[in-house]
Image: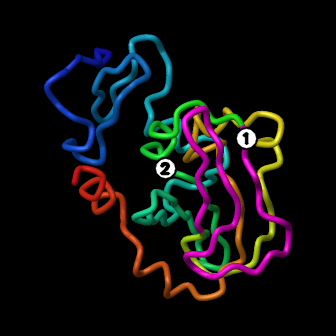
Amino acid sequence: MAAIARPHTALRISKLPLSYSRCPLNRITGPGWRCPAGRPTIAQSATRGFRSSPLLEKKYTKDHEWVELNDDKTEGTIGITHYAASALGEVVYVELPEQDLEVTAGDSMGAVESVKSANDIMTPVTGKVIATNEKLQEKPSMINKGPEAEGWIARLQIGDAKEVDGLMDLEAYRKHTEE
């Protein structure tokens, strides 16, 4: 028997176990459940796009950036979180970092401009920019559609993998956004 997604309007997504998500129709979905419209849930869509393995380590900053590390923690993909993207509103321009730019954790490496405001993109870890998401130049709204997937901003060669240990995991980041 196929599982059916049931709406639970009283629950907040941040209060749910990590195996739960919200589908684009704003319904809470549990493990194995599908959106009635056949669309992927937010958690399912986050595994699409740039992400190649669900086992990659993803960490978050208090400034609402994320870094997803490869298996050997030598490279990381950086972007802004869903929380930041929704707070910004419609993104209209993205200033990407330059190739081979050396950055230190906490440095500004670009900017995101929306109809509401302009904000710097802070790098969560020290490293060297090895790639940027050039598609954002033509379609900055990709950040709104998938900030933690196809809306990634840059890839870094990580200078010190131990810096990642000081960042938040998903559970800690959710608690941070509730404060």
Q: Is residue 165 left or right of residue 125?
A: left
Tell me how far mark 1 sits from mark 2, CA to CA: 17 Å
Mark 1 sits on what residue? 93
Q: Which quarter of the figure is the C terminus placed in?
A: bottom left
Q: Which quarter of the figure is the N terminus placed in?
A: top left
Residue type indicated by callout 1: Tyr
- Cβ atoms at labels 1 and 2 below 8 Å apart: no
Residue 152: give x, y in percent of width and height: 65, 51
What residue span does the magenta drawing correspond to? 93-122
Mark found first going from the N terminus, 1 or 2: 2
Residue 24: give x, y in percent of width and height: 44, 21
Q: Is residue 137 left or right of residue 125?
A: right
Residue that appears at 48% across and 63% down:
58
Taking the magenta stretch, the answer to whether it contains residue 7 is no
Residue 78: give x, y in percent of width and height: 62, 61
Q: Is residue 151 left or right of residue 67?
A: right
- Residue 67's tag is none
Residue type indicated by callout 2: Thr
Residue that appears at 57% across and 69% down:
69
Taking the magenta stretch, the answer to whether it contains residue 108 is yes
